[in-house]
Image (tube, rainbow, N blue to C red):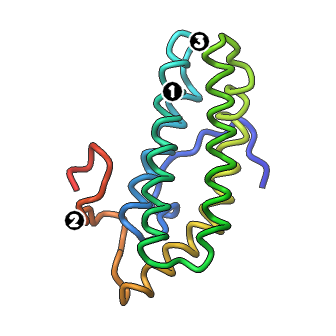
């Protein structure tokens, strides 16, 4: 699937069925839309917020995979490391005043990567966690887990 200039919008079809992962994905999609639509003045701060979110999001997901002995943890973790390094390199170009590569990434490459990653690695991860917990970690609205990032009250 090639995404060109499409702004992702969160909807329940993007949920993978684990509250922490779904919360992070919802926040990622919202931040990505904000950064994509930002003017040049606001873009650097919003891209920095996106970089911080991705760092924290991946750390939470990595913790879940370790906690539940996810069989594909090494592969999933390497993908997180690769994408985080890419985003951090884009942030360095933004910090140097060059917004072009990061604008292309948020408008085209990151939405495409997110959909692919969600449809493969994250769906399998969430399914494994559900099996490991006897079907727990249910739907997207349950934030009683106490591990959400700021904002959901969970």
Of the image marks 1 and 2, the number of the one nearer the N terminus: 1
Q: For the residues marked 1 and 2, what is the alpha-carbon distance in whole angstroms?
A: 29 Å
Q: Which residue, given by chain and number where applicable, does mark 2 sit on?
A: 144
Mark linked to residue 40: 3
Quarter of the picture holding the N terminus: bottom right
Q: For the residues marked 2 and 3, what is the alpha-carbon distance in whole angstroms?
A: 38 Å
Report whether 104 appears left or right of 61: right
| Vertical position of residue 38 compared to residue 120: above or below | above
| 9 or 34, nearer to the observer | 34
Report whether 109 appears left or right of 67: right
> Residue 138 lies in what quarter of the image?
bottom left
Give the percent coordinates (x, y) of residue 56: 44, 46
SS label for mark 3 = loop
Disc 1 residue crowd, few under 14, some 14–19, many 20+, Cα 10 Å: some
Of the image marks 1 and 3, the number of the one nearer the N terminus: 3
| Vertical position of residue 136 compared to residue 23: above or below | below
| Vertical position of residue 134 compared to residue 109: above or below | below
Give the percent coordinates (x, y) of residue 141: 30, 63
SS label for mark 1 = helix
Q: Which residue, given by chain and number where applicable, does mark 1 sit on?
A: 48
For the point 37% across and 61% down, the residue is 20
Of the image marks 2 and 3, the number of the one nearer the N terminus: 3
SS label for mark 2 = loop
Eye-nearest disc, 1 or 2: 1
> Residue 101 lies in what quarter of the image?
top right
Give the percent coordinates (x, y) of residue 136: 34, 81
Q: For the residues marked 1 and 3, what is the alpha-carbon distance in whole angstroms?
A: 13 Å
Give the percent coordinates (x, y) of residue 130: 42, 82
């Amino acid at each position: 699937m090639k995404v060109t200039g499409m702004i992702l919008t969160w909807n329940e079809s993007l949920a993978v069925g684990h509250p922490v992962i779904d919360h992070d994905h919802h926040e990622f999609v919202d931040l990505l839309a904000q950064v994509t639509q930002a003017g040049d003045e606001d873009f650097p701060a919003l891209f920095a917020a996106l970089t911080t979110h991705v760092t924290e999001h991946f750390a939470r997901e990595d913790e879940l995979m370790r906690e539940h002995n996810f069989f594909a943890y090494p592969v999933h973790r390497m993908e997180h490391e690769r994408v985080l390094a890419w985003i951090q390199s884009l942030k360095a170009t933004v910090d140097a005043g060059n917004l072009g590569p990061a604008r292309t990434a948020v408008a085209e490459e990151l939405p495409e990567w997110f959909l692919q990653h969600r449809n493969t690695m994250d769906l399998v991860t969430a399914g494994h966690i559900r099996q490991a917990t006897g079907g727990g970690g249910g739907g997207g609205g349950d934030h009683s887990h106490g591990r959400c990032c700021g904002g959901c009250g969970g």
